[in-house]
Each structure stands twice: as structure tokens, then as C-alpha cells.
Amino acid sequence: MIKVRKTLPPLDRLPRPLRGVALFFGKLQWKLTLAYTLFTVITILILGAIALAFVWYTTFLSNTMPNRIADGLLRVGPALTPYLEQTPPDQAGLQAWLQKVTLDNDLVISIPKDDAVDETDTVAAQFGRFATVAIVDAQGQILAAVSGDEAAPDGPFQTQLSPEAAAGFQAALQGETDPALLSARDADNYLVATAPILGPEEQVLGAIFVKTALPFEQGEFLRIVLQGTILPVAVVMLIAGVIAGVLFGFMIARGLTRRLQTLAEAADAWSEGNFEVLARDSSGDELGTLARQLNHMAVQLQTLFQTNQELAALEERNRLARDLHDSVKQQVFATVMQVGAAQASLDHDPGAARTHLAETERLVRQAQQELTVLIQELRPAALEGKGLATALRDYAVDWSRQNNIETGVRVSGERVLPLHLEQALFRVAQEALANVARHSRATTAEIYLSWEGDDVVLTITNNGQGFDVAAMVGKGVGLRSMRERMEALGGHLAVDSQPSAGTRVTARLGRAA
């Protein structure tokens, strides 16, 4: 026997106000809405993290910033050409120019705009806090220099450069104009860039070298970016994302839950046997396909149900026809014969006529008993809510009185059974007792109903004349009917009998049948 342990749902452990909130937000519509909202918020956070990582990479890892410095220096070259075209070069003018563009330790140079129409159409380009700015001639000799974070260069300039800076410096003196080849990050994470200063015929007159520090440290960078950009934008986007997620999720979830509700209502109707209700969903997505498949299943179930009802009714009519043919019809025919014999002997032999009439009365009573049995079979007692044991006791009392056969009923370990199992076992008992009345010539019979583990066992025994079971295989309609009932429910029927030794019929069913 399976024991079911009763446990309270988790919601029952919550206080009443929280329970109402949990039930409200436990609905599928709100679950989907919250899921959409959470997905939107997470997406915004991921995009913010990607943006922060991109800025971090651009600032501290890639050559984007050195390349931009080199590109700016290439635009500065034409402004320095007049100083280098002189012989000797105007070092004082170059030094004054450097002092002008390096105010307050920041390098700010006016460079021509991309769409400049003349030399005065410029824009101030900020190169950041410089460490060293130097202008050299075509041989790499320093003509003018200023220093910020470092000491002023002295002596051969190229020998004072890091390998990364020296490579770009040498390329500039060779006339290279690709910013990617003129700039780099050195080992100390400084930004270094060199640009050639070209003459009217594109000859190299010299070069300008710039070494700048990063605009801020990594910790300061995080603080500035987070406080100045990421956090304000993230807050606005999160608020907008929550609002958009709730509205969008609510609308999508509402439509989805309505469609699921339609399927649930149709399923409830089908569970009650009403297969005329169909799930109305004409969409082409998975839910629409599911609704159409379920509707098709409902139509098939309705057809199958009707077919089974018709087959059951036909089987019951055939069984009744066989029973009427085998019992009542034969008895009525015998009664007619006895009445005819009584009429023939009434005038010349009244005693014989009375004998025939007495036999007629016996046959009529026997036919009445057979009809009573058939009527009771049409209205099983198990369907009246009595329970199988009570129904068998009541039926045994009536059957014993009608057939003048002493009958006992024993029940062991009674439990509740599903209605379809009770009905099947009751039918078996009716059929077995009917066979006892018709064929056994028994004086006593017993019905024993017991539960053995998960099985229920019904045994009907009698002390009648018995029969050869092997000889009856395939012949007894009643035995075949009982066996088919049991096998249809996953059970089995056993018949044990011998001539002059009585009969035992045992029907066994599992409770899960």
C-alpha cells in the first residue's frame, strides 16, 4: 500500500500578505514579464561592461592613441618647414615655437582641419602631458627641445630613445608617413611618436619627436569613466530598460498566457468528456501547431469513445441474447410443451394434466429467476456507491434465496477500489454464480474477496458436480466472458474443477489496473 505524506506547499508557510504577493507574481504572465525585464537589465550591464573594456583597451593596450599623436604631428610638419629651410636652420625660432605650444606641461598644437581652405583654418590638438618634445634635422641632431617629466635630451638623440621610439624615429628620418610605423608604446608605457618635416619637393628636412605620458593612471581612469560616463548612462539606460522590459514583457506574456489559458480550458472540457470544445488558435507558431494537434486528438478521442460505447453496447446485447437463448428461451419452449401436454390430457387424465401444470409452474419460476439475474446484471450494484464487498453480500442474499443454494461471503483486508475494477469483479461474480445455478447442481457456494499486497482477489467456490476444464476450453461463453474482462484490465482468471469435486473460479487484479 502506498502511503502519501501530506506536506504543506511552500506558500502556506509565508505570512498572509507575502503569500498574496507570491501568488500574484507566481503567475506565468508575471514570471515572463520579470524574465524579460531581467534580460533587458543584464543586456544593458553587459553592453556597459563591453564599452568600458573597449575604452580600457584603447587607452592602455592598443596603439590607437600613439597613432593619433603621429597623425597630428604629420599635420604639424608644414608649419615647421620654414624654420628648417633656412641655412642654417632657425633654432631660436624653433625653440620659441616649442615654448609656445608647451604651456603648463601640456602639448597643444594648432593643426589644419581636414577640410581646411587656407593656412588659418586650424584646430587646437591636445597631445597631453609631455615628457619630451624635440625637433631634429635630417641627420637626427637636436635643433630645439623642451622637457616636462624628464630631463632635457643632451648629446646624440637617437641613443637616448627606447627601442620602440628609436624605430619610429629612424622611419621618420627616412620619410615614412604611415602613423602605425611612426608611433608606439615604450617599455614604460609612454606614448612615443615621430613625424618627418618635409620640404617643398618632399625631401626630409628633419623630424619632430614627442613623448607623452598617459593622460591618467588606471585607477583614475576607472574613476573618471565610471563617474563621468558609465554610471550616468547606465542609470538612465537601466531605468529605461526596466520600463521597456516591463511593458514589452507584459504585452508578450499577456498574449502567451491567454493562448495557454485557451488550451487549459479546452483540456478541462475534454477531461469531463466534452470533446466538442476545441482550442481556438490560428497562429502559425509552436502553440498554434500544438492547439491544432490537440484538437485533432480530441476529435479522434471522441470518435474512439463513441466507437467503444457502441462496441460495448453491442457486446452487452450479444451477451444478453446468448443468455436469453440458452436459458429463458429454452425454459419458455419447455413451458409451452408442458402446457400443450396438460391440455391434451385434461379431459381423459386430470392427474397427468396436473403433473404437467406443476412442471409448467416450475419452469415459469425458473424463467423468472433467470430474468431477475439478467436485470440485475444490467444494473451492477457497484455503480450504486455501495462498495464491492457490500454489493457482493446483497447480491449473494438475493441469489441464494432465488436459487435455494446456501451462499456465504467472506471479506479480508477491505480497501477502496476504483469503480471500473469493482464493476469488473462484480460482473465476474455474477457470471460465476449464474454458471453455478445453471450447471453445477451445488447445494452450497462461497464468495471470498481478499486483498493480497497490491492485488485484489475474488474467489467463487461451490460443491457441485464439477467438470473437465480442458474439455471446456473455447466452449464456455461465460468462462470466456469472465476471462476477457480480467485480461482487459491486466488481470487473469483461473478455473480449477474436476468431475464430482466442485469448482473454484479465481479472478485477480492489480490495484493499478
Image (cartoon, grey):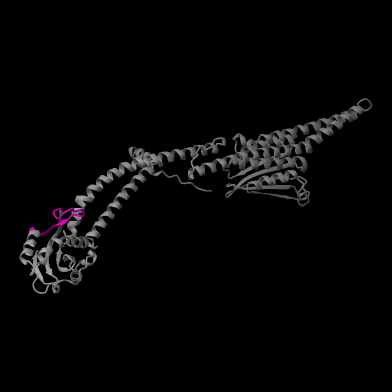
In the image, is residue 111 part of the stretch drawn in magenta?
A: yes
Q: Residue at x 26, y 57 (%)?
A: 54
Residue placed farthest to the right in the image?
Answer: 348
Q: Is residue 494 left or right of residue 187?
A: right
Closer to the camera, 246 or 438?
246
Q: Is any part of residue 27 visible from this angle?
A: no
Closer to the camera, 53 or 137?
137
What percent of the width, then of the height, locates residue 216?
Answer: 16, 59
Closer to the camera, 142 or 418?
142
Closer to the camera, 409 or 285?
285
Q: Is any part of residue 368 visible from this angle?
A: yes
Q: Is residue 347 left or right of residue 425?
A: right
Q: Quadrant of residue 305?
A: top right
Above-or-below relation of 488 to 192:
above
Residue placed farthest to the front in the image?
Answer: 201
What percent of the width, then of the height, locates residue 192?
Answer: 17, 66
What percent of the width, then of the height, locates residue 13?
Answer: 36, 42
Q: Is residue 99 left or right of residue 70?
A: left
Q: Residue at x 31, y 43 (%)?
A: 242
In the image, is residue 234 part of the stretch drawn in magenta?
A: no
Q: Which residues are magenta?
A: 103-121
What percent of the width, then of the height, locates residue 273?
Answer: 57, 36
- Report the label total: 0
